[in-house]
Structures are given as structure tokens and as C-alpha cells.
Amino acid sequence: MKIKGSIALVTGANRGLGKAIVSALLEAGAGKVYAAARDERKVSADDSRVVPLTLDTTKTDQILACARKAADVTLLINNAGVLNSYNVLTTSQSEMDADFRTNVHGMLAMIKAFVPVLERAREGATVVNVLSLASLASVPTMGGYAASKAAAYSITQALRPELKSKQIDILAALPGPIDTDMVRALQLPKATTADTAMALLVGIERGEEDIFPDTMAQQMGALWNKSPKEFERAFARF
Ligand SMILES: NC(=O)c1ccc[n+]([C@@H]2O[C@H](COP(=O)([O-])OP(=O)(O)OC[C@H]3O[C@@H](n4cnc5c(N)ncnc54)[C@H](OP(=O)(O)O)[C@@H]3O)[C@@H](O)[C@H]2O)c1
């Protein structure tokens, strides 16, 4: 799909990658960007095309209110995510639940609410789920989070044929580490949010089902294509 003239909604748009995606969309000529955040006062709205929305993706009433207000969306970017659960033997049930609540159930609830909206788009519409390289094989030090991102990837695949029949594409973004609050403590090379957001839009325009938006993602994506087992072993060393 073309970003120019599109009407996008980005979740978790107040900081990190979501904020950079909003800027990249505006730069690329999006017609309107609904910037959804748990606290909409934290959204930068210095461009008249930005419409801030209050949205916690774990709250059904807020999701339904957004689907009513943003009834012209053609590009839904499910970016909101959390990282609470680490080693699967030591992480608590409530930490795992928190990751699944936002990363899996919140994402799916957004798609369910927005399918009727996206179906109305005359030239087809797109859903982008911001997942992770950890959707493809676990990083054991964040095994709970990885499990939530793997489940979200499986749901993305599950939705693809049905959404296709409604002229809606569904794409998975699979980044490596990005320089945001989420992984502030990790001592690893990280991509910038601006570069990741721009590469994400290129992948959307190309309609890539699996978007590998940064250098590490591209390298690891190539390894995954060649040998999922080697990919798993490489991630087990992180
Ligand atoms: N950073 C990385 O290395 C990396 C790598 C691969 C994938 N990702 C994925 O990229 C996405 C963006 O993450 P980030 O790195 O930008 O993280 P971040 O800096 O921690 O930002 C997370 C964003 O998600 C929002 N959010 C969290 N739970 C939410 C909920 N229930 N409802 C609505 N918004 C919610 C946060 O809002 P508040 O400000 O209200 O908390 C914040 O805007 C996530 O899906 C993450 O899993 C990140």
C-alpha cells in the first residue's frame, strides 16, 4: 500500500518506536495519523494531521471507542508492547500474563475491532503487527516475552488468509534490538528508532509479509530462512 495519503493509527505512539513511526508516517505524506497512547497528553501533536487518542490496548471499552472515532483508518500499526517476563523458570505468572495481555490479546482485540473499519477502505488496507526477531526463536533470557511475541506471530499467520479475502494485508515487523526504554539496560548494538521506523514503512509499501527493518534483523532473517535450527542456537547464546 502507499503511505502517501493513507490514514494510519499507531498504538503506543507517545514514545519509543511508536513515536518515531508517527514522525516517519508524516514525513512520508500520510493524510492523517491517529496517535494512540494510554495518556494522550503525552502525544506530540504539533502537526495538524495528528489526532491523539486515548487507548490502553488491554481495555475493551477504549478499543471500541477508538474504532468508532477512527472510522476512516486504512493502515493499523499495532506497536504497543511490553517486556515484563524474562527467564521462564523464574518469571512469575503475573509477569507472563502482563506480556500476553498486551502483546497478544491487546493486539488481537485491536484487529478484531478494526476489521470492519479496514474493510471499508476502497483501495485495500493493511495491518502491521510490530513483533520481534524473538517471535521466530526464543531468547531464553527473555523467554516469557519471546513466547508472547511468538504467539502474536502465529496469530498474524492465522489471520492472513481470512483478512486477504477482505482485501486486508497483514504484515509482521520483526526488528532486532532498538534503542528505546524497553531495552535500555541491554548492552547490545541497537538500531535507532528513526531508521527502524523508516525501514518499516519501506516494508509496508512493498507489502512484505515479514519485515526485517534493521541490520541485525536482516542478518538474522537470512539465517532463519537458511536454517531455523541455527537461528535458534544463535539466539540461545544471547
Ligand atoms: N526496543 C526493542 O529492542 C524492540 C525490539 C523488537 C521489538 N520491539 C517491539 O517494538 C514495540 C515498541 O516498543 P519500544 O521499544 O518502543 O518500547 P517502549 O519504549 O517501552 O514503548 C512501549 C510503548 O507501548 C506502549 N504500551 C505498552 N503497553 C500498552 C498498552 N497496554 N496499551 C497501549 N499502549 C501500551 C507504551 O505506553 P506507555 O508510555 O503508557 O507505557 C509505549 O508507548 C513493542 O511491541 C516491542 O515489543 C522492541
Image (cartoon, rainbow, N blue to C red):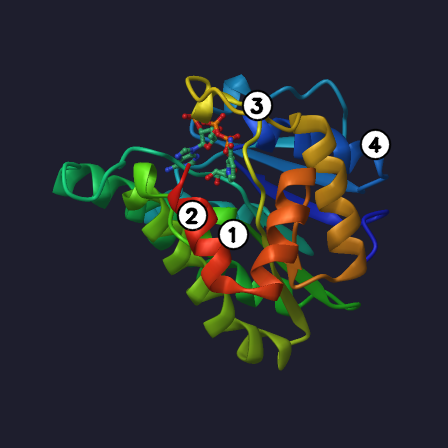
Q: Is residue 116 above or below residue 181?
A: below
- Residue indicated by mark 4: 27
Gap between marks 1 and 3, in whole Å? 30 Å
What residue did someone put label 1 on?
67
Contact check, label 1 and label 3, Cβ < 8 Å: no
Nearer to us: label 1 or label 3: 3
Tag 4: amino acid: Glu
Q: Three-letter amino acid code at disc 1?
A: Ala
**CB atoms at circles 2 and 4 under 8 Å apart?**
no
Classify mark 2: helix, strand or loop. Answer: helix
What amino acid type should be assigned to the residue bearing mark 3?
Answer: Asp
* Residue nearer the viewer, 119 or 81: 81
Q: Residues within 10 Å of mark 2 (few under 14, many from 20)?
A: many
* 199 left or right, relative to 16: right
Q: Which residue is mark 3?
A: 179
Q: Would you call the spot at circle 3 few (<14 residues within 10 Å), some (14-19), or many (20 or more)? A: some
* Depicted 214 relative to depicted 45: above or below: below
Position of residue 197 in the picture relative to residue 35 (left or right): right
